[in-house]
Image: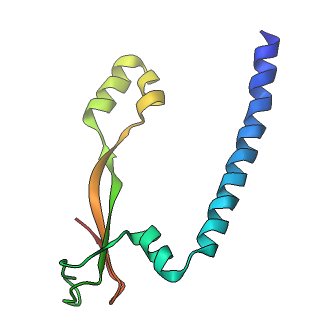
Amino acid sequence: MEYGCLIALLMIPVAIVVGIIQGIGEKAKLARMSPAERAEHDFGPIKSKLLCPHCQTTGQVRTKPIEQKKGVSGGKATAAVLTGGVSLLATGLSRTEAHTQAHCMNCESTWVF
């Protein structure tokens, strides 16, 4: 039993160091990208037929799918009450919805639909 706790305590700093190294690698990768590659990474590919609602430009709008948090889920709150909060460890309380984020490269506006 004592060895299990010791191993768990040793794994926490290892996980933190691995996370830091991965974050540094991602930053270095982003720094090496050209401006066009960075725009593709941040905002997705250009959709040539989309019209920007702000500047009325066609062919400059990039889109990508995103997950957006939307308040508290009623079903998850009910499950938390019934299980004494144990279900929150696995599911969390907020709900997410799939949306599309659009960004105009002409006027730099970003919106979600």
Residue at (51%, 82%) from the top-left corner? 35
Furthest residue in direction top, as rendered: 1
Pick the quarter of the image with the N terminus.
top right
Q: Is residue 7 left or right of residue 61?
A: right
Looking at the image, is 15 positioned above or below residue 55?
above
Residue 17 location, x and y as percent? 75, 46
| Left or right, residue 78 beside residue 92 | left
Where on the picture, by quarter, is residue 68?
bottom left
Q: Quadrant of the C terminus?
A: bottom left
| Residue 108 position in % (x across, y down) | 36, 85
Circle count: 0
Q: Relative to 98, is 46 above or below?
A: below
Q: From this view, report whether residue 98 is shown above or below residue 38.
A: above
Task: Identify the residue shown where x is 19% and y is 77%.
Answer: 50
Q: Residue at x 81, y 21 (%)?
A: 6
Closest to the observer, 105 or 74: 105
Residue 49 in which image quadrant: bottom left
Q: How is the image coloured?
A: rainbow
Q: Is residue 69 above or below residue 102?
A: above
Q: Quadrant of residue 63?
A: bottom left
Residue 53 placement (x, y as % from top left): 19, 82
Q: Residue at x 77, y 19 (%)?
A: 5
